[in-house]
Image (cartoon, grey):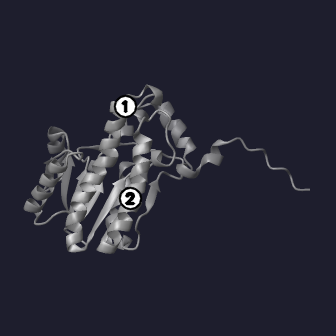
């Protein structure tokens, strides 16, 4: 894969993490396509990245995604070298009060949608024997929040799908990895951190003692999609300041006994 002027597709790119990820590739000089369901918000986002392409599309609809791939190829000369599967939704609330319709919708967008786009992009990458896919999971994939509905199941499924795709596509020249954001002050979590008490509490539970930024996630995605990560394959990189393995920091610990 060339070092510059790659064609990069980022889904769920009308704002938040998706737009930050698209901006990271754009700053490198790559040709960036932003895909989202909300055409109006998407157009405004693309306007902040001169030369980028706004593609309105539904990740759960195969025909919509195939049309998006054709539009990207017609605009930039070929289909994506890099796919970032970022599109996602969440429905908060007590799991027992969750409607089956909401549960299915979250699985459909976060997991099935990622498969739909990955399959479409990968067919074209395999034809060139080159490409990289980065799926955006979540801390919820490894440490579910009790009020996050189907989101943890969807993201855990996406982490597993990442390895499955890696096994299938690796021998055909396509690398597949995932990035798992933790407590990131951006995107769907941004409104949570408007509460100073929540910001302070969560910051103190993170071993790195701070919330993450959208740029932290974008940098990790950029690395995994780059030639420098050529031998990184099927991995789930947590960008979480260490919170995913910090259980013992949250547990009461006896004071150490003095040595005699």
Place of residue 64 in the rendered image (x, y in percent of width and height, measured from the top left): 15, 48
Q: Which quadrant holds residue 103? A: top left
Residue closer to the observer: 73 or 250: 73
Residue closer to the observer: 140 or 98: 98
Disc number placed over residue 203 in the picture, else none: none
Residue located 15% across and 49% down the image: 63
Q: Look at discs 1 and 2 and give the one toward the viewer.
A: 1
Q: Earlier in the sequence, mark 1 or mark 2?
A: 1
As drawn, is 78 to the left or to the right of 2?
left
Residue located 33% across and 45% down the image: 110
Place of residue 16 in the rendered image (x, y in percent of width and height, measured from the top left): 30, 44
| Residue position for label 2 | 162
The crowding category of the residue bearing disc 2, from other C-alpha atoms within 10 Å (few below 14, some 14 to 19, many at least 20), is many
Residue 179 in sight in this render? no
Q: Is residue 163 above or below residue 139?
A: below
The CA distance from mark 1 to mark 2 is 25 Å
């Amino acid at each position: 894969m060339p070092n510059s002027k790659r064609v990069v597709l980022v889904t769920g790119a009308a704002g938040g993490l998706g737009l930050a990820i698209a901006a990271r590739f754009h700053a490198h000089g790559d040709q960036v396509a932003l895909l989202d369901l909300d055409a109006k918000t998407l157009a405004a986002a693309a306007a902040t990245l001169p030369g980028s392409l706004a593609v309105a599309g539904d990740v759960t609809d195969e025909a919509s995604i195939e049309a998006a791939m054709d539009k990207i190829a017609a605009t930039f000369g070929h289909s994506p070298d890099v796919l970032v599967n970022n599109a996602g939704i969440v429905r908060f609330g007590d799991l027992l009060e969750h409607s089956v319709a909401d549960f299915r919708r979250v699985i459909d967008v976060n997991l099935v949608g990622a498969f739909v786009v990955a399959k479409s992009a990968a067919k074209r990458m395999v034809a060139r024997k080159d490409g990289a896919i980065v799926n955006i999971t979540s801390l919820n994939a490894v440490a579910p929040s009790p009020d996050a509905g189907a989101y943890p199941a969807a993201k855990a499924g996406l982490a597993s799908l990442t390895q499955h795709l890696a096994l299938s596509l690796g021998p055909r020249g396509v690398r597949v990895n995932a990035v798992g954001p933790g407590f990131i002050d951006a995107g769907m979590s941004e409104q949570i951190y408007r509460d100073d008490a929540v910001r302070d509490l969560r910051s103190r539970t993170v071993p790195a003692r701070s919330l993450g930024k959208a740029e932290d996630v974008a940098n990790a995605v950029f690395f995994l999609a780059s030639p420098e990560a050529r031998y990184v394959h099927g991995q789930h990189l947590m960008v979480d300041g260490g919170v995913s393995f910090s259980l013992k920091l949250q547990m009461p610990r006896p004071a150490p006994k003095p040595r005699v």
